[in-house]
Amino acid sequence: MTAAPLQIGPHTVQPPVVLAPMAGITNAPFRTLCREFSGGKGLFVSEMITTRALVERNEKTMQLIHFDESEKPRSIQLYGVDPATVGKAVRMIAEEGLADHIDLNFGCPVPKVTRKGGGSALPFKRNLLRAILREAVSGAGDLPVTMKMRKGIDDDHITYLDAGRIAVEEGVTAIALHGRTAAQHYGGTADWDAIARLKEHVPEIPVLGNGDIWSAEDAVRMVRETGCDGVVVGRGCLGRPWLFSDLVAAFEGRTAARAGGADGYCARPTLHEVADVMVRHATLLGEWIGDEARGVIDFRKHVAWYLKGFAVGSEMRKRLAITSSLAELRSGLEELDLDQPWPVGADGPRGRTSGNNRVVLPDGWLKDPYDCAGVSEDAELDTSGG
Ligand SMILES: Cc1cc2nc3c(=O)[nH]c(=O)nc-3n(C[C@H](O)[C@H](O)[C@H](O)COP(=O)(O)O)c2cc1C
């Protein structure tokens, strides 16, 4: 399929593929890796940054908003619950030239966030959502502001169509919809019909579809089936940054450099090639953090994803997941049978897949969707995820 370009304000994203923001994952090194595989095409969103930490210039937060010089456009995702603080954070980004695009996170289902009325609980309060979007858009000046959300809190409290309309009215540039409710967390399957419905409901702005894209073929199918203007890919990239070469190839209507599999889009690296990417990923993390050991330690969480499906014994998996230096990581990898081809069984779901949790909300939250009560500011403390 040859896909039309996606327009996010002044930024043309061609082909229309977006790396989903993932806390603890989509930092500058991971975005660099994905961009290398995509040939620089696509949009790569930072992990979420809390607005309060940003306006307070928290040291760790200032590192998280670091972009590689070659990264264009620079895309930051913000998480905030207070209109004034969101406005301040957005103004700071615009005035100091810290990014080229701002995405707002209203999809986080983590109980410690929804308990305070933040994340995926927030769009239920229509007026609060409107106030946050208004502050963000007015503070952003020429920078495009987009939002990412879920379908709603649960099947009885669906919010995405109202939220979509509010977003259009407040001047949001594009909307990404993860086709799950907060109650579903990452369980079940994403509802792509909801993406199609949102597309019909807000024809004024681009709609991006998100949820359960595990291959380039899934991405093409989502665009065909829903009419969405672009795709946002998260867990499918965990331990598989080369998925971006497949995505670009598929949307440019050609097969991947080394096609394999039934779909013909899929680059299927050998374990040798995967090991090289692992070392590169860990190296980039070390350079970014400014400390090799800390980079390798941060890389540990990626090991199981990279090795998924390959014949690697459990002892060796454990050993590779506790390495503290590049030399240790390299020597462990060299002991593997590196000639193994890509295991076909590794193509499906990966990362978080559990669901069906009761959504914890503030007392009385669901009584009135239109009351104007704010959310306590500590809803922004120590939050992560989406
Ligand atoms: C580890 C992890 C961290 C995430 N962090 C964020 C985040 O910071 N902001 C956000 O909007 N979504 C976050 N998400 C949700 C993803 O962006 C995406 O919406 C979700 O994984 C569904 O897409 P997928 O099926 O392609 O993974 C996170 C997901 C995972 C698995």
Image: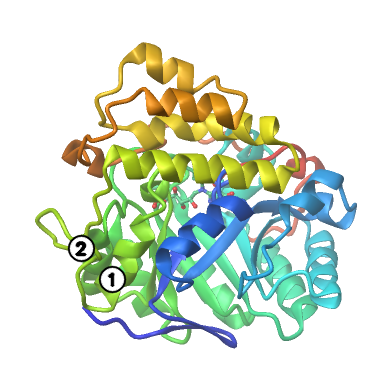
Question: In the figure, is residue 100 to the left or right of 39?
Answer: right
* Res 249 label: 1
Question: In the figure, is residue 257 to the left or right of 34?
Answer: left
Q: Quadrant of residue 81?
A: bottom right
Q: Looking at mark 2, is its residue's CB closer than 8 Å to ligand 1? A: no
From the viewer's side, name the closer residue of 1 and 256. 256
Counting from the top left corner in percent of width and height, residue 264 is at 14, 62
User: Furthest-top residue in view?
Assistant: 315
Instruction: Measure how far apart labels 1 and 2 are at the Cα level.
Output: 7 Å
Counting from the top left corner in percent of width and height, residue 289 is at 72, 43
Counting from the top left corner in percent of width and height, residue 105 is at 60, 57
Residue 365 makes an appearance in the image: no
Amino acid at pointer 2: Tyr
Q: Which residue is mark 2?
A: 265
Identify the residue at horizontal 23%, vertical 35% (top origin). 339
* Kind of element beneath mark 2: loop
Identify the residue at horizontal 29%, vertical 33% (top origin). 338
Q: Quadrant of residue 90?
A: bottom right
* Kind of element beneath mark 1: helix
Tag 1: Cα neighbours inside 10 Å, few (<14), some, or many (≥20)?
many
Is 227 above or below relative to 185? below
Tag 2: Cα neighbours inside 10 Å, few (<14), some, or many (≥20)?
many
From the viewer's side, name the closer residue of 175 and 259. 259
Identify the residue at horizontal 34%, vertical 45% (top origin). 273
